[in-house]
């Protein structure tokens, strides 16, 4: 992706920029599942749950294009592909932690009712 082109396409608001990159249910779950370390495609599909292969592939490609994940293909038969977070992807950990904490507090709040 051309850097100049990418800058022109990004929204002016930083919150909107972040949501453009990770504001999708599947992308957030992919990030969550890659935080502990590298995973293969099948492992990701299983850990995420109810996601189709087509959608997972599309999400992974978009995240790779945006610099959030690395995709490593091994020249083996059958081919082995592994995914991991880039440094930029790992920098989203505080955001995911905040989402986790808020969700836990919300569940506690709802359960007290």
Image (cartoon, rainbow, N blue to C red):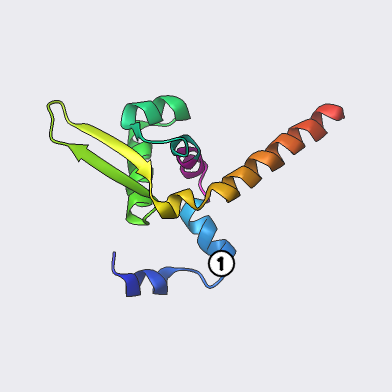
Compared to residue 91, the image places residue 26 above or below, namely above
Q: Residues within 10 Å of mark 1 (few under 14, many from 20)?
A: few
The N terminus lies in quadrant: bottom left
Lateral position of residue 76 relative to residue 10, left or right: left
As helix, strand or loop, the secondary structure at mark 1 comes to helix
Res. 50 visible in picture: no
Please give the name of the residue rendered at 40% of the width and 72% of the height, measured from the top-left corner. Answer: 7
Which residue position is annotated with label 1?
A: 14
x, y (%) of residue 86? Answer: 38, 50
- Dominant secondary structure of the magenta stretch? helix
Please give the name of the residue rendered at 29% of the width and 69% of the height, measured from the top-left corner. Answer: 2
Compared to residue 3, the image places residue 84 above or below, namely above
Compared to residue 44, the image places residue 27 above or below, namely below
Lateral position of residue 55 relative to residue 102, left or right: left
Please give the name of the residue rendered at 28% of the width and 44% of the height, measured from the top-left corner. Answer: 71
Residue in the foreground of this view, choosing between 54 and 76? 76
Please give the name of the residue rendered at 54% of the width and 47% of the height, measured from the top-left corner. Answer: 93
x, y (%) of residue 55? Answer: 37, 38
Res. 6 visible in picture: yes
Residue in the foreground of this view, choosing between 81 and 6? 81
Q: Residue furthest right?
A: 113
**Residue 27 covered by magenta stretch:** yes
Magenta stretch in the rendered image: 23-31
x, y (%) of residue 43? Answer: 37, 26
């Amino acid at each position: 992706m051309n850097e100049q082109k990418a800058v022109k396409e990004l929204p002016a608001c930083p919150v909107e920029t972040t949501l453009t990159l990770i504001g999708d249910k599947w992308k957030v779950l992919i990030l969550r599942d890659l935080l502990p370390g590298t995973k293969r495609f099948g492992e990701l599909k299983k850990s995420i749950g109810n996601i189709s292969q087509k959608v997972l592939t599309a999400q992974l490609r978009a995240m790779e294009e945006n610099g959030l994940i690395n995709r490593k293909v091994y020249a083996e038969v059958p081919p082995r592909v592994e995914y991991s977070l880039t440094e930029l992807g790992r920098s989203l950990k505080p955001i995911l932690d905040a989402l986790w904490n808020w969700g836990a507090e919300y569940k506690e709040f709802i359960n007290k009712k």
